[in-house]
Amino acid sequence: MSFLQANCPSCAAQIEFKSGSSIVIVCPFCRSAVARTDRALEDLGKVAEIMQSQSPLRVGLHGMWNNQRFELTGRAQIRHQLGGVWDEWYATFGNGWVGWLAEAQGKFYLTFYQPLPQGTQIPSFTDLQLGQNIPQIPAKSPLMVAEKGVAASIAAEGEIPYKLVPNEQSEYADLAGKGGVFGTIDYGMTPPFVFIGQEVTLAELGWADMKPAERKAPKVAAAGIGCPNCGGPLSLQEPDSSERVTCPNCDSLLDVNQGKLTWLKALKPKPDAEQFALQIGAKGTFADGKEMTILGAVVRSVLVEGIKYYWHEYLLYNPAIGFRWLVQSDNHWSFVEPVNVADVVGMGSTADFNGKTFKLFQDAPATVEYVKGEFYWRVEQGETVRAIDYVKAPLMLSNEMSADEMNFSLGTYMTTAEVEKAFNLEEPLPKPWNVAPNQPFTGSFYYTWGFAFVGILFLIALLMIPFGGFSSTPLNQSLTLQPLPNATGSNPAFSQPFELKGNRNIRITMDAPVNNSWASFDVDLVNEANNEVESVPIDIEFYSGVDGGESWSEGSRNQDVSLSSVPAGKYVLRVDGQWQNWQQPLPVTVKVEQNISRGMNFCCAFVLLLIFPLVSIIRKWLFESNRWSESMFSTSGSDDDSDSYDSSNDENAFGDQEHIQTIFDKKKI
Amino acid sequence: MLKKLYLVFGIGVIGLYSLGSWFGWELANSGRNSRLGTPFFFSGGYRGGK
């Protein structure tokens, strides 16, 4: 590597350009940005010192990308017009490539300069609209505008591959494509420069074991600053990334500028804003095992049909993974993570993400009512964005849209027990009420298993047909019962012996030619081997006649009874009884069948097994009714359809930009 | 706990049905004048000789 050594035009200290692609070097002695030109070195002005950060990266670090070694040769800190600061690292590859590694909110994006074909026209910054596709820029997947803004380089170190002018503002647009494809249009150049790449992990850059830089959270009060309004002490958890902090002593909202605090306004808590259930600074461990600290808390509201609904959001931070949110609404909880804008398809009555279809639940302006703690953006009371929520329990896909930025996030429902466990709380959290938009129905176990049981029941019933065998008729005989000695007397008759098999149910059918009379029989199934008797009563009555010219009949001349199985063996039937015309003999027919398909056992089991799933389905129906009664788009509750729109035919996730903007303007409070 | 109890209940019902089918147990008498409510352990029990 050839070095260019020179003296700093500002302080005359020796500086050296190690990379041939470097345009600017920051003098390590006087912090002047020194540019090399064809003729001489040019002093572009002083840059601020890099703000302390927990970034695991540092200038001089070596990494690997696509089997190419690179070195981080420079770094700039860029401030968004709304206050957020992100880092850009410049990766100089051995083969001459220069990569831009952006680090923002715990995410990393590696991009490379992408020369556009001759004559390519990309929209101007003012013409650019959020959600607009930019097909002119070739990339692995179509790119859309996710953010546009104005930013300035406020601090730098090392070597920079472009002419970095300290604090010079330039316009940019961030582009997003499916699968983490990422791009930036830098309107600071003419024509604009385009950088294309993708979101990367530290592991993909050869830094799998890298951990956040260790540093103490400086306590501003210890430095003798404190709250500029009341003088009370306050501490900053993340002074390098915080833009706003509230004073816990006087409830003032303060601006944070590299540790310097400026009083902005006194916060006015809404009278119905509840106390926060979790404390600022509390640490919680979530599903991925990462410990996250609560940096700030916000009370937000949404105005629907003249009624304000409030909820709380907690800003969580871990230097290794960035910012997350914990949302508390009606004491229901959701853990919220950002998702790639371009991975969301469609934004009409449904939206698709990660192979799942989400249903539109709410579309309304969300307003910041009260803040506490510190924030990475310049939060304001009254700050309003358009918030669109789609649900597929236990997930909620949310789109927050301002004039210059769109963000999608994915919330996952958490039970209060899970939140209590995550934060190791000793006091229980308040119990939730209502049904949360993304609350999963927990009773599905009962109908899932209930219907599985019913299915198994049918299967067993079918299997029993071939395994149990078919029905048989061991006895079918006519008997004549002799006249009785008196009306209550007895004169039994016996059938011929017959064989009964074990483990088979039995049906005894009696047929008696009664006519406008009755007969009552005691039928005994007698085991010839041991004289054990199974006795059943059978009553027969049959009446008929003509009444008013119409014939009628009642009863039947035959009846049957069913019995459980008896031990296998030889049996006879003993038939005794009384009948109305006891003075006359009564001819009867008796039939004994085995292995009959009766269905009573099946029906009873079927009804028993169906009770739980049916109750569960009714509960689920009520649960879903409650859930959707809270939605602006429920069939029962969406009286005002003017708020809804259908952009299912739109080419990208954001549909008709003009239409969206109209709705946003209409909904601004 | 409730879920486990429900599983035991469901398996029990299916188990009883299977046993009943296999061994020829009838839950209740039938016929046109159904004697529902007479469980098999009454109708199927031996009452001794007459």
Image (spheres, rainbow, N blue to C red):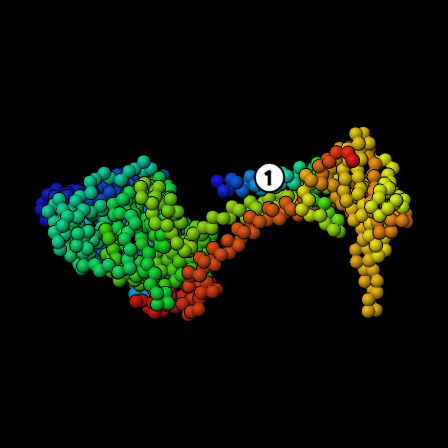
Is residue A430 shown above or below A654? Answer: above
Chain at numbered mark 1: B
Q: Where's residue A174, x and y in %?
A: 32, 56
Q: Residue A15's image quarter?
A: top left
Pinpoint residue A246: horizontal percent, then vertical percent.
20, 53
Residue A132 visible in image: no
Q: Is residue A221 left or right of residue A661?
A: left
Residue A65, horizontal then vertical, whole percent: 34, 41
Q: Is residue A392 left or right of residue A279?
A: right
Identify the image quadrant of the C terminus of chain A: bottom left
Closer-to-camera residue (B18/A460): B18
At 32% from the left edge and 50% from the top edge, which residue is drawn? A325
Q: Amino acid at mark 1?
A: Gly
Task: Locate residue A617, reporting x and y percent.
Answer: 53, 53
Depicted A494 relative to depicted A180: above or below = above
Q: Is residue A432 visible?
A: yes
- Name the residue: 17% across, 52% down: A249
| Res. A319 image quadrant | top left
Residue shown at 18%/46% (left/top)?
A235
Question: Dot 1 surroundings within 10 Å: few (below 14), some, or many (20 or more)?
Answer: few
Residue beneath label 1, please? B12
Residue at the spot 84% in from the left edge and 51% down from the top edge? A580
Q: Is residue A484 left or right of residue A272?
A: right
Residue toward you, B26 or A36: B26
